[in-house]
Amino acid sequence: TRQAGRLLAGALGLATGMAAPAALADKKEDKKEADAARAMFDPVALERGAAALREINKSSFGKQVLELSKQQELTKQQEMKSKEAEFLAARAQHESERDRVRFQEEHKLEEQRSQVAARMKQYEDELARKRLLAEHELHRQRDAEMVKMQESASARQEGERLRIEQQIQAERRAAEGYAADLQKEVAREKAKAESEGRIREARENEDVNRRLALLKYQEEARKALEAINAVMSHLGTAALDLISDPNKMGMAVAGLSALFLGLYGSREAARVSGGAIERWLGTPRLVRETSRFSLFKPSTWTNAAVKGTEEIKKDFSDIILPRGLHNNVRMLAASASNTKIHGAPFRHMLFYGPPGTGKTMAAKRLARTSGLDYAIMSGGDVAPLEGKAVTQLHQVFDWAERSQRGLLLFIDEADAFLGRRSDSMSEGLRGSLNALLYRTGDQSRDFMVVLATNRPGDLDDAVLDRMDEALEFGLPHKEERTQLLNLYLDKYILKAGTAEGDAGSAAATSIGSRVQALLRGRKAGADTIEVQGVDETHIAKAAHDMEGFSGREIAKFMAAVQAAVYGAQEAVLTPELWATVLKRKLFEHEERRAFRLGHHGTGDSTSTKLLEQQLNLSVSSKPKQ
């Protein structure tokens, strides 16, 4: 058995040694596996197998060993086939997995390529957009530089035109002055020649003139003597009659006495009645304008009716003020109207703000709406009166107290004589200030005082204490400037040449009006103005550019537009003409502001040129060349 075991082990070794090349031979297609099989070949095992076969052949159990080894070989082959099948299945699975992984990798690669392509496209689009933006910005900068160059050229042309115009005007004034001097010299020489001719003629005819003068004197003396003799003879006769008749003498004395008494009494009566009429119906000298009763104004003969709230709103509907100020003025008008009805004391007011903002207009409308008379005086008229100012101020207040309706006394430029008291104040101004403080110390049921000033800080503290209400009239905002432009455009342009317009005159229909217009060198009827191209856009732009303009400056601008239209060949308002006048008025406004700031100078100064250039840049519309 031991020998059989050894034989079996040798057979198994031989089978193992031979099975390995057989299995590897079936896989010759795989080069690597063949190389591995050759590396596993062991010749020692082959020799042992050959020795074992020889022993088996010699042994009695050789046949069983061969059968057993054959069965083991078959078993090994089956195991190898099963392993081969498993290997092939694993290989197929590995190839399928490899294909799947390769497909996933290719899919991922395709996705990455598409993403890269999309990013490249986006990057190219971004580069194109940036390039377009850069080109647009470059074009915009070039256009802006071109506009600046054009505006600068236009400014230079306008400055050159103004300089040439000023030079022409200066030369014209010089020529007119020279012509006037020449005319004066000719007239003087002519008068001298005429006087010398008359003197020469008088000298040549001296004897004849002397004889004629002597004869004329003798004739006049003879006539005078004859008249004196005739008068004296009549007087002598009358005197003899009076002396001889006592009744005639008494009647003559009584008649002369009555004549002298009548003349003296008439003179005194006229003086007294004139003073009374002047005191009751006359207007004090300090009052420049009033709505008090006048025999020459029938509109002042009746009392104004008391108005309600709605009527007061209607009265103030055509006055353009900032909304808050408009409501305050209207409320004060209603309060003054109710104060008059109930007989309560009036309240004094202070209107302050820049010039041309509607203080005087609001005071007039407040008086008219509340049913009061109004009187306007200027503080500038009080200062030059010195000592007489006190008397005339008292006359004004006495006259105001006699008003049957009640009177609103509007004092413009109040700071001219109501400034702060100081040692440098003259006695006349101090007396005027004290007179007004005395008359406004108590509440009055006959008059109310409205002070207007551009410098409220200069007023005396006592004057400010007398004022019950204080309203600031500021410069109009853009909305109010637009409304003012539309209002004055309607009055000065659209209704020019009609009876409703404030500028220009309607056609003269009567003979008297035509003759009067002819004598004054005017046309019988003003031309109507046609508007072409000027719309709400131009008005809105003008309102925006006119920041800082007062209502009076806006009215002057529209009057200048009308004058420019009438100065053209045709009465047509165009956008070019509108822009030209607007540019000029903006320049004048900046000049006035520079004057107020202390930069006084002429149009040739550097600051003025800089202001003019800034204005030319701010106005986009080109003026008419």
Image (cartoon, rainbow, N blue to C red):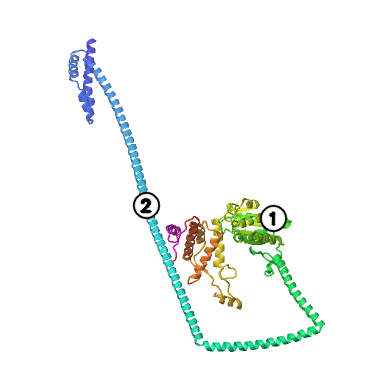
List the residue tagged with mark 2: 132
Q: Quadrant of the C terminus?
A: bottom left
Q: Name the amino acid type tagged 1.
A: Phe
Tag of residue 346? 1
Does the magenta-highlighted stretch encompass residue 616? yes
Magenta-drawn segment: 600-623
Residue 255 appears in the picture as rendered: yes
Residue 406 coordinates in the image, percent (x, y)? 70, 60
Residue that lies at the very extreme toward the right in this rendered image: 247
Please tell me in which quadrant of the rendered image residue 165 appears.
bottom left
Residue 281 coordinates in the image, percent (x, y)? 70, 66
State the residue in front, 383 or 552: 383
Helix or strand or loop: what does disc 1 sit on? loop
Q: Name the amino acid type tagged 2.
A: Leu
What residue sits 37% from the left and 51% below the top?
134
Does the magenta-highlighted stretch encompass residue 586? no
Helix or strand or loop: what does disc 2 sit on? helix
What residue sits 19% from the left and 18% below the top?
45
Apparent side of residue 51 relative to residue 258 in the rendered image (left or right): left
Q: Quadrant of the N terminus?
A: top left
Q: Residues within 10 Å of mark 2 (few under 14, many from 20)?
A: few
